[in-house]
Image: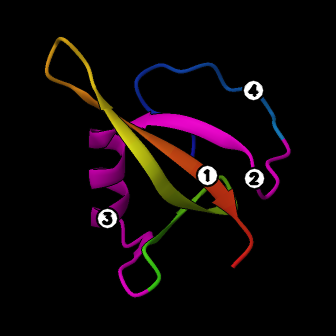
Amino acid sequence: MTEPLGALNVLRSWKPGDVRELPEKVLRKLRLEDRYDSYSQVYELDGRRWKVQGQVSQPNGETLLTMVCVDE
């Protein structure tokens, strides 16, 4: 899946322990696309599995979620 919202397409070799931030609306889209495992609470993105590590509310009302790449 390519990054939505006009993000740059940069090839990256993600590995367990890597961290990234995504807007909450991207995670909602992943759930609709059946790329979320509710049992293990893991999202599938860019060929890797990601867990929510934290979240930050922005002044504009948007929520950014910190995701960590996991090897599960």
Magenta highlight on residue 30: yes
Q: In the rendered structure, which segment of residues is drawn in magenta?
A: 13-39
| Spatial separation of the CA atoms under disc 3 and disc 4 | 23 Å
Question: Label 3 crowding class (10 Å Cα cut-off): few <14, some 14-19, many 20+?
Answer: some
The amino acid type found where label 3 is placed reads Arg
Above/below status of 64 relative to 61: below
Please state the horizontal and vertical placement of residue 14, each as a whole percent of the image: 79, 48
Q: Is residue 68 left or right of residue 52?
A: right
Question: Label 2 crowding class (10 Å Cα cut-off): few <14, some 14-19, many 20+?
Answer: few
Question: Label 1 crowding class (10 Å Cα cut-off): few <14, some 14-19, many 20+?
Answer: many
The residue positioned 40% from the left and 24% from the top of the image is 5
Please report whichever mark, 4 or 2, sits nearer to the chain's N-terminal start: 4
Give the label on residue 68, or none. 1
**Residue position for label 2:** 17
Are the two marked residues, 1 and 2, in contact with CB atoms closer than 8 angstroms? Answer: yes
Please report whichever mark, 3 or 4, sits nearer to the chain's N-terminal start: 4
Q: Nearer the viewer, residue 33 or 15?
A: 15
| Spatial separation of the CA atoms under disc 2 and disc 3 | 22 Å
The residue positioned 57% from the left and 40% from the top of the image is 2
Residue 3 visible in the snapshot: no
**Residue position for label 3:** 31
Question: Residue lying furthest bottom in this view?
Answer: 39
Q: Is residue 61 left or right of residue 33?
A: left
Q: Nearer the viewer, mark 3 or mark 1?
A: 1
Give the label on residue 10, or none. 4
Q: Is residue 51 left or right of residue 34?
A: right
The amino acid type found where label 1 is placed reads Val
Please report whichever mark, 2 or 3, sits nearer to the chain's N-terminal start: 2
User: Which quadrant holds residue 36?
Assistant: bottom left
Above/below status of 20 relative to 16: above
The amino acid type found where label 2 is placed reads Gly
